[in-house]
Image (cartoon, rainbow, N blue to C red):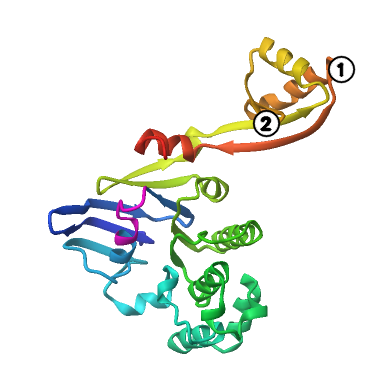
Amino acid sequence: MTKIAILELQHVNKKYKTAQVIDDVSLVIDEPGIWALVGPNGVGKTTLLNGICNIIPFNSGKVELLGQPNDNYTVFKHVSFLQDNTVLFHYLSGYDHLKYVCDVHGLPKKRIKEVAAYVGMTGYLEKKVGDYSLGMKQHLLLAISIVNQPKLLFMDEPLTGLDPSSAILVRKILLDLEKQGTTIILSSHNLAEIDRVTNQILFLKNGKIIEVDRENHMETHYIFKLSDKLSGKQLLMASGYSIQEENGAIKVTINESGIDKCIKSIQDNGISILDIQKEVTGSEKLYEETFGKRE
């Protein structure tokens, strides 16, 4: 039995006058997970997502979502697209927006309060969107996009305008959805947040998709605050560790299997560890290798 792809693009192209924005892109995603669509402003990320969701037509090529052509509207019972907040109506409340989506999908009204509580917007559900902050609008957009419990979810800059607490909540929701079997394609400029939710990156450059597994490029750092920073720095350098100084602390590049040895070495030399934090990076370095350093 042939396995049905969750998302399949076959030789899709999009051209605006003389500008080839999407250039013969083919892609198959056949396992659930989270993929980050990454590239500078103006590279065509939104155009690609709009084309996949049949909001704008591609000039050529084929798109299938959950095994169905993207012009078959019934597939959007199980597919959602979180767009930017220009799709919201300022004179309507958050409740009005969610009620409309529930009506379209034939969902019970109880889903409105369920999803509002899930994304943390119960306190302003009845307020008009014109009185929402940018972060509140992002919460509403998220609620709209997941109210139908989609199997495939596209998200255009879902982390824009979020304070740290909201960003943590959205990250938790994304990881929850992934565990439930939802496949998520999200575009984002926030590389630190990407590192926290996925290793699977789709770079969009010159109209082409470059598929990368960040796991093959990850670097693990441990940030130490020591009772004697100078002695600790000298000790770690003499032991051959790659280190950087950062806000009064020492950042050590080391894999997980070597951390116990590093800690023991510090403590055996009479230096107390006041604090230690783990940091995993990778997407920023890959971004710079693909597009050059960001200004």
The residues colored magenta run 40-47
Q: Is the residue 276 above or below the residue 196 in the image?
A: above
In what quadrant of the picture does the N terminus appear?
bottom left
Residue 108 versus residue 239: which sits nearer the camera? 239
Classed neighbour count for the residue bearing mark 1: other residues with Cα under 10 Å, few (<14), some (14–19), many (≥20): few
Q: Is residue 74 left or right of residue 88?
A: left
For the C terminus, which image quadrant? top left
The x, y position of residue 135, in whole percent, is 56, 67
- Residue 77, position as x, y percentages in the image: 41, 78
Q: Secondary structure at mark 2?
A: strand
Left or right for 256, reference 46: right
Label 2 sits on residue: 222
- Name the residue beneath numbered marker 1: 270
Give the total of numbered labels: 2
* Quarter where residue 210 is shown: top left
Tell me which amino acid carries mark 1: Gly
